[in-house]
Amino acid sequence: MKSNDWDVLISSVQIQEAIRKLGAELTEIYSGKKIVVIPLLKGGFMFAADLVRSMGIDLQIEFLGAASYGEQTRSSGEVRLTLDTTLPLADRDVLLVEDIVDTGLTLAYIQQLIRSRNPASLRTVVLLDKKTRRQVDVDLHECVFSIPDRFVFGYGLDSPGGFGRNLPDIVALKD
Ligand code: IMP
């Protein structure tokens, strides 16, 4: 894919500035606590890597992986767990970090899975929200950017061909 196939929707400068702000807010919210941060793979890895470095508290990191079957630019809502945590989550303060919420089906599935393990608390932060596409209600504590219904990639998210996760900006495919 060539750079004239997409538009920059959110620049790396805007992303980094917003994440520094969110990191400072979370540092205050979790002050004095030892939390478990769970990036949801694959797309959440880059957001989580920057977010944890902007948080000045003790934390552990676990990973969950999810994938949904579907067409290249639309998820089917049928979610598969591709990677599970290794530490027990019972009585822990859990911060789930996700790249994008579209229909909400992936997040609803993952939140239900985490809640079934009886954490002391669960907070979900999401980088991108495609609000107009929501099919189920999900608890979003912080959403960094609301975006229109366009297929986006970069900054951890992949393009239909599976590439593009390493772009520093979030870009949208031209129609
Ligand atoms: P949902 O279950 O429909 O909310 O979809 C969430 C998942 O679909 C995300 O974790 C992404 O992996 C993927 N996804 C949804 N929209 C996009 C997009 O615009 N670009 C890349 N991945 C997307």
Image: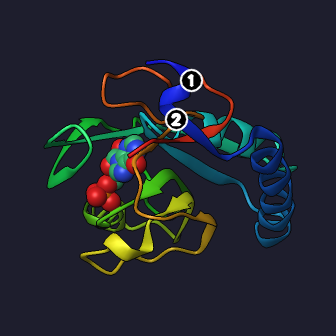
Q: Which residue is mark 2?
A: 6
Question: Would residue 43 be found to the left or right of residue 117 on screen?
Answer: right
Residue at point 62%, 70% (across, down): 142
Q: Is residue 92 above or below residue 50?
A: below
Question: Would residue 151 be found to the left or right of residue 68 on screen?
Answer: right
The amino acid type, in three-letter code, at marker 1 is Ser
Residue at point 82%, 67% (across, down): 25
Residue at point 46%, 54% (across, down): 100
Expressed as whole percent of the image width and height from the top left, the position of residue 162 reads 35, 22
Q: Nearer the viewer, residue 40 or 116?
A: 40
- Quarter of the rendering containing residue 60: top right
Few, some or many C-alpha atoms within 10 Å of disc 1 (few <14, some 14-19, many ≥20)? few
Question: Would residue 30 be found to the left or right of residue 159 on screen?
Answer: right
Q: Which residue is mark 1?
A: 3
Expressed as whole percent of the image width and height from the top left, the position of residue 115 reads 35, 68
Task: State yes or no: discs 2 and 1 in contact (Cβ < 8 Å).
Answer: yes
**Residue 109 badge:** none
Few, some or many C-alpha atoms within 10 Å of disc 2 (few <14, some 14-19, many ≥20)? some
Q: Secondary structure at mark 1?
A: helix
Q: Secondary structure at mark 2?
A: strand
Q: Is residue 155 above or below residue 36?
A: above
Is residue 63 at all visible to an observer of this figure?
A: yes
Q: Is residue 127 above or below residue 7?
A: below
Q: Is residue 111 above or below residue 150?
A: below
Question: Would residue 163 be found to the left or right of residue 137 on screen?
Answer: right
Residue at point 79%, 57% (across, down): 18
- Quarter of the rendering containing residue 133: bottom left
